[in-house]
Image: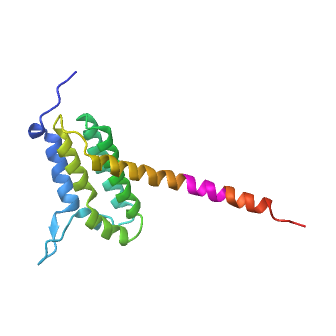
Amino acid sequence: MSELPRVSDDRALAALRKYAYLLDAAFQVPGTKLRFGLDPIVGLIPGAGDIVTGFFSAMMLLHAVRLRIPKVIIVRMMANTALDLLTGVVPLLGDLFDAGFKANLRNLALLERHATPGVPPSRSDYIFVGICLGILALLAIVPVLIFWWILWAMSNINWL
C-alpha cells in the first residue's frame, strides 16, 4: 500500500486551493469585505457554470477519496456540491447563492481539515449529513404518499 502524501507536499491540494479561490473569492466588491469568484459570473451563462462547478467538485471529491478522507466528510462535500448545483439551476438567484455559499471553499476547508490522518469527523458533520439524508428521504417519500392519498380519494368517490 502506498503512503499518503503529506498535506504540505500535496501538489494536487495546492492546485485545488488555487482553483477554489479563483471560483469563489478571487474578486472583492470595492469598499466592502464581500468576495466572489468566477463561479457566479460563469453561472450567468446557462449550463456553463454547472459544468465548471461540477467538474471542479468532482476533482476535489476524487482527491478526497485518494487521501482517504472519512466517508461522512465526503458525503458532506457531495451535499455542498449538490446544493450548489441545484440552486444554480435558478437563473440569477442561483448565481447570487453561489456568490454567498461558496461551496468550493467549504469543500476545500473540509478537505484540508481532514487530509491530516487522525482528524476525526465532528458531531456537526454527522448532523449535517443526517439532515441531508432526512431531506432526501422526505423528497422521496412525500410524492409516494400524495400519490397513494389521491388513489385512496379516487377509490372512495361514487362515480355513478
In the rendered image, residue 13, in percent from the top left (x then y), is placed at: 17, 43
Question: From the viewer's perspective, is 83 left or right of 136?
Answer: left
Span highlighted in magenta in the image: 141-147
Residue farthest along the left direction in this orientation: 8
Q: How many marks?
A: 0
Residue farthest along the bottom direction in this orientation: 31
* Image height of 18 relative to 39, above or below: above
- Foreground residue among 46 and 103: 103
In the rendered image, residue 7, in percent from the top left (x then y), is placed at: 12, 39
Question: From the viewer's perspective, is 103 left or right of 113?
Answer: right
The secondary structure that dominates the magenta segment is helix
Residue under the image location 62 percent in, 54 percent down: 144
- Picture colour scheme: rainbow
Instruction: Specify whether residue 21 is painted magenta.
Output: no
- Foreground residue among 90 and 69: 69
In the rendered image, residue 105, in percent from the top left (x then y), is placed at: 22, 55
Residue farthest along the front direction in this orientation: 123
- Foreground residue among 114 and 13: 114
Residue under the image location 19 percent in, 48 percent down: 16
Question: From the viewer's perspective, is 39 left or right of 83?
Answer: left
* Image height of 150 relative to 8, above or below: below
Q: Quadrant of the C terminus?
A: bottom right
Give residue 41's quadrant in the image.
bottom left
Question: From the viewer's perspective, is 103 left or right of 18?
Answer: right
Q: Quadrant of the N terminus?
A: top left
Residue farthest along the right direction in this orientation: 160
In the rendered image, residue 147, in percent from the top left (x then y), is placed at: 66, 57
Give residue 33's quadrant in the image.
bottom left
Residue under the image location 23 percent in, 59 percent down: 23
* Image height of 102 relative to 108, above or below: below
